[in-house]
Image (cartoon, grey):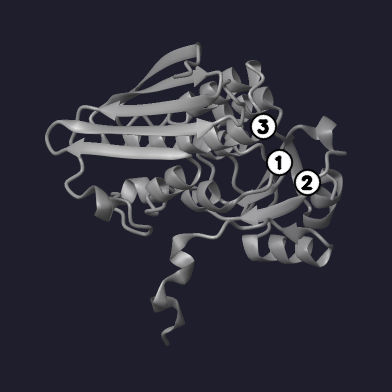
Amino acid sequence: MPRTSLVLKRIYPVAPRDLERAGTVSTAVRRELLDLGVGADVVRRASIICFEGEMNLVLYSTGGRVILLVEDDRVELLFSDHGPGIADVELASQPGYSTAPDWARELGFGAGLGITNMEQNSDLFKIRSRVGKGTVVRATILRGIPFF
Amino acid sequence: MKLRDVARLVEAEFVTGADQADREVTRAFAADLLSDVLAMVQDEGVLLITGMTTPQVVRVAEVMSMGAVLFVRGKLPATATIEYAIGTGIPLLATRRIMFDTCGILYQAGLKAAQRKSMPLDHAPDLSRP
């Protein structure tokens, strides 16, 4: 089985409700990918996925982190938090469904398109969540580079 | 359309990036809802027309490789956000005009709408009901 080597790994903590810094993980991820010479389309998709995931952590979680993994053939973004968890992931993934509080909507977020947008920009997308424990989201983007 | 023409047409001032007045913006997208900007804009080099002035506006413009941001209704972001924008190289413009006027003037002058990604909601049956 072909193995691809890890090119870069970065871990970014995300504080809950920190609106001053919300979005800075995504801009940092974008710069890392540009510095590595990752293709423009992949950088753009990864940046959009990261922004949506980061905003979800800021708006809804009790704190979490983003992990960026770059391999020869793929870019992976892992989002994890310690709660509160999503009771019905299928419902939360429906376009237009949102539990965003008013203060989040006033900032221009919480339209209920986040998970859909993350999925549409991913080649592989997975959410697992347990109420009271937390949520893990994994988004993979293939770089279009053959690995053998 | 060059940014200098955008500025002239809607009587906008350059808040940052006046030295990039010759930069071309390919198309435009107007919204206050950043969720929609993130989900629907697919082109690069787009002019974002918005009345939202949070730090996230410039960060969204940055991650989406937008050409410039034009603030409407006489609004301006906080100084820290303006300083951040200088570092990104994305010009910020501001006009006192409302969004409807701004869009109408630029559209009439030939600036085209940004291509919009299709969304699952496009097929929602509720839209066609009276």
Q: Chain of mark 1?
A: B
Secondary structure of residue under mark 2: loop
Q: Nearer the viewer, mark 2 or mark 1?
A: 2
- Disc 3 residue type (three-letter): Ala
| Residue A44 higher or lower than B33, as above or below | above
Looking at this view, is A48 or B30 the one in front?
Answer: A48
Q: Tell me if label 2 and label 1 are in contact, CB under 8 Å.
A: yes
User: In this rendering, do the residues under marks 1 and 3 share a single chain?
Assistant: no
Q: Which is more toward the observer, A75 or A87?
A: A75
In the image, which disc is placed on residue B25? 2
Q: At 78% across and 49% down in the image, what residue appears?
A: B26
Horizontal arrangement in the rendering, residue A86 relative to residue B111 (left or right): left
Residue nearest the viewer, comparing B7 with A70: A70
Alpha carbon distance from label 1 to label 3: 18 Å
Describe residue B58's horizontal placement relative to residue B95 as left or right.
left
Are the residues under marks 2 and 3 on the same chain?
no
Residue B129, picture quadrant: bottom left
Disc 1: which residue: B68
How far apart are the alpha carbons under marks 2 and 3?
Answer: 18 Å
Q: Which residue is mark 3?
A: A40
Measure the alpha-carbon separation of dots 2 and 1: 7 Å
Query: What percent of the width, then of the height, locates residue A100?
Result: 30, 49
Q: Point out residue B53 in the picture as x, y percentages from the top left corner.
A: 54, 42
